[in-house]
Amino acid sequence: MAMTSVYRRSLPSPPAIDFSSPEGKKIFNEALQKGTMEGFFKLISYFQTQSEPAYCGLASLSVVLNALSIDPGRKWKGPWRWFDESMLDCCEPLEVVKEKGITFEKLVCLAHCSGAKVEAFRTNQSTIDDFRKFVVTCSVSDNFHTISSYDRGVFKQLFRSLVFMLISRPHREPGLLYTLTCKDESWISIAKYLKEDVPRLVSSQHVDTVEKILSVVFKSLPSKFNQFIRWVAEIRITEDVNQHLSAEEKSRLNLKQVVLKEVHETELFKHISKFFSSMDYEDILTYSAAKACCQGAEILSGCSSKGFCCQETCVKCVKGSGEAEGTVVTGVVVRNGNEQRVDLLVPATQTDCECGPKANYPAGEDVFTVLLLALTPQTWLGITDQALMHEMKQLVSMASLPTMLQEEVLHLRRQLQLLKRCQENKEEEDFAAPAY
């Protein structure tokens, strides 16, 4: 039976101009002479064609992220860290993207999650002059790039979407230690809970202390909440049990440790830590590390994590550059009878106790702390006790936070805003960069 297929389908010319044609070369040369091809060279250096018909959004974004030299913080294959379509799955499962493609809203969210600074627009929210201004900005600089989705009807193709986004690199990769994910469908109910239910809960008459606020918020958390916000750990394949941390690995681990220390020093964390202690809550590092090692093995092997089982974990200190130490959890992960050792680089801080120095790792207390800090100030305006409302606003005030923690919280706040827009799925919504 005959099967329909297409090979190098020709586009109508005009308006299309073949890039390699004499006219295309002439236009390229003119633009080069005028200095309006600056953004081209980094893009072409990292250009990749999409591996699936519906991966056009993922392929475009991975090219731009690599061109902006944004570090994904995890390896692609072998020792190399760079973005690939297969790594862009925090906002939508790849199986879904493969079948249906990815929405503009989810692509914007994905760019934010990957560490880029994004301004996104629909054409009915901007003008052709706005678009031309952004194109000029990108053409004379290699620090900005535009991804656009347009009406292909004039080229006799079927796709139609009128949106574009300007992507640039922030001065520091945000989301260094904490991030949100909407990969699990439970994010819809959790986003609604944070945006709508929390303000209602704290406005209740019986909420008269900070501890009561924490109690009503924590005890009403939706199921699978721990799938929504996570702390980020770097993973690597264990190649040598005595292997030291590289200078880059130690540098990234140090940054995470600074953020973790800043979280632990906030007054809000002290309230939350006391509240968690009263509930006999315990977050065991080896348990969360075992799950992370399975996820790491999935990423490194490209196989589904459902087939992985972490049989054992071992917490150890390894030397870094300058003999500084770092905490590494090594997990023995098994799949189909085959063992693989995965290293998890874990940030840690120390506190002095009566029994000596105590190591503190990322846990539920600090995750809950940064999430409350990321909620908008309007969340607490319904508290009926004015003194309590003022105290709560002071506890979550951005002005009192150190710079690195501020950036971390702002990143989570932008993610929350984007998730809210994705949840509402408003076609006429303004998808410009969320307000801080």
Image (spheres, rainbow, N blue to C red):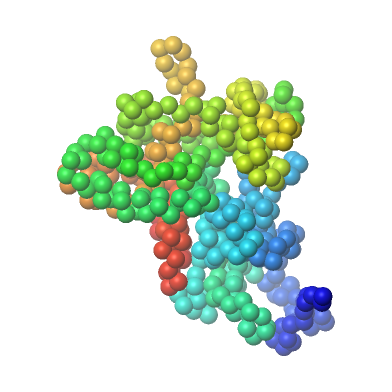
Q: Position of residue 276 (x, y in %)?
A: 35, 29
Q: Where is residue 406 in the image (x, y as percent from the top left)?
A: 43, 45
Q: Is residue 246 visible in the rendered structure shown here?
A: no
Observer-nearest of 281 and 46: 281
Splitting the image into 4 quarters, where does residue 147 fall? bottom right
Q: Residue lying farthest bottom? A: 14
User: Is 254 left or right of 341, judged from the image as shown?
Assistant: left
Splitting the image into 4 quarters, where does residue 98 fall? bottom right
As drawn, 14 above or below 348: below
User: Is 9 left or right of 368, judged from the image as shown?
Assistant: right
Image quarter (top left, top right, bottom left or bottom right) of the C terminus: bottom left
Q: Position of residue 28 (x, y in %)?
A: 75, 76
As drawn, 147 above or below 1: above
As drawn, 118 above or below 162: above
Residue drawn 69% across the image and 49% down it: 82
Residue drawn 74% across the image and 33% down it: 338
Q: Where is residue 199 in the image (x, y as percent from the top left)?
A: 28, 50
As drawn, 22 above or below 217: below
Image quarter (top left, top right, bottom left or bottom right) of the N terminus: bottom right
Q: Residue lying farthest front? A: 1
Q: Is residue 91 visible in the rendered structure shown here?
A: yes
Residue drawn 37% across the image and 54% down it: 192
Observer-nearest of 433 and 104: 104
User: Total marks drawn?
Assistant: 0
Residue drawn 58% across the image and 31% down it: 290
